[in-house]
Image (cartoon, grey):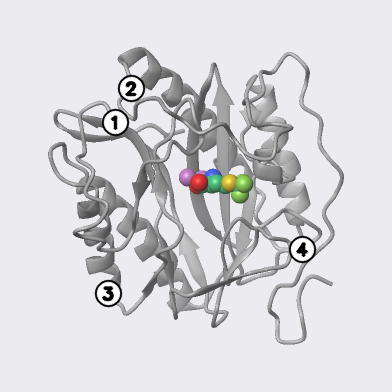
Amino acid sequence: MPRDATGHLTIGRVSGPREVPGFITRPEYVGKAAPTPFTGSNVKTPEQVEKIRAAGKIAARAIQLVGEACKPGVTTDELDRIGHEFVISQGAYPSTLGYRGFPKSLCSSINEVICHGIPDDTVLIDGDIINIDITAFKDGFHGDSNVTFIVGQAKPEVELLVERTHEALMRGINAALPGRSVNIIGRAIETYAKRFNYGVVRDFTGHGVGEAFHSGLVIPHYDSAPHYADEIKVGMVFTIEPMLTLGTHEWEMWTDDWTVVTKDRSITAQFEHTIFITEDGPEILTLA
Ligand code: MF3
Ligand code: CO
Ligand code: CO
């Protein structure tokens, strides 16, 4: 059902809500149409950073566990169940569940899906690539990460896209030095991606993260100078999450109002880390 005659993905069937035990604290936006706008700082105290690191570790371990299950024959709904169960087993809340009405505990974005795919009855097949994006909320703080996995073996050009998208993330991270503008990050990513003629998605960005899932600070993945010139400050915490494509950077939204696909249906990959800026440079907070 969820692929058409040309092999492209189509809207699937979404299972009913999964339970979260009552003792697990929900983010404030759950049950509301939208989060309360964040008015705090993107610079965190050492105590706050350790809470984001703890949440980030849960997200990273959940992603690893889900990644091990990304084999031909599994549904994305089953992947959601695995991620959900792990996150709640750690006493954490899966931040996407109920975020602006998102119905599931992770985003599963296959092939031409750029981001925000909803887990459903889609069955993985050999040669797919699938991004698993999990955010955990624990002790009042979110940690946000994602990884693109290859299902079985993919075409060489697709495997290269995945490897280079990870490299683009690492180059973006390494460019995030205190005193620079945040637009240095996208410059590093786009410069690298352009070597291979990849599309660099512009309209979905990295973001400040911490007490809020999305703080309002925007981190573009393309060279946005002279715009997005916020200074990278010691103590800042934000995500970097480049989306690169084998074709256009342009996108379309499915009628579910979540699933974002490449306009030309070209294959797209993404990787994400939450990072913390120290005097010596960036530190990754989403390590397993
Ligand atoms: N985790 C995604 C990000 O990296 C956000 C997902 S929001 C959702 O920012 F509602 F789509 F789940
Ligand atoms: Co993010
Ligand atoms: Co994410």
> What secondary structure is marked by label 1?
loop
* Horizontal and vertical percent position of residue 232: 21, 38
Is residue 5 shown left or right of residue 27? Answer: right
On screen, residue 174 versus residue 50, left or right, reads left
Mark 3 closeness class: few <14, some 14–19, many ≥20 residues within 10 Å: few
Contact flag, marks 1 and 2 (Cβ < 8 Å):
yes
3D distance between C-alphas at marks 3 and 1: 28 Å
- Quadrant, the N terminus: bottom right
185, 90: nearer the viewer: 185
Where is residue 199 drawn, in percent x and y?
A: 39, 74
Instruction: Mark 4 and ligand 1: say if the CB distance to the nearest ligand atom is below 8 Å.
Output: no
Identified by mark 2, the residue type is: Lys
Q: Secondary structure at mark 4?
A: loop
The picture quadrant where one finds residue 237 is: top left
The residue labelled by disc 3 is 194
Q: Residues within 10 Å of mark 1 (few under 14, many from 20)?
A: many
Distance from disc 4 to disc 1, alpha carbons, whole Å, reads 38 Å
Q: Given contact means CB atoms under 8 Å apart, are the residues at marks 4 and 3 in contact? A: no
Work out how far the residue at label 4 is from the one at label 2, CA to CA, in angstroms: 40 Å
Q: Which residue is mark 1?
A: 236
Return the residue at label 4: 122
Residue at horizontal 28 percent and vertical 61 percent from the top = 189
According to the picture, the residue beneath numbered tag 2 turns out to be: 44
Name which residue lies at 77% across and 48% down: 78
Amino acid type, mark 4: Thr
Q: Earlier in the sequence, mark 3 or mark 1?
A: 3
Instruction: Pick whichever of labels 1 and 2 is earlier in the sequence.
Output: 2
- The disc, 4 or 1, on the residue closer to the chain's N-terminal end is 4
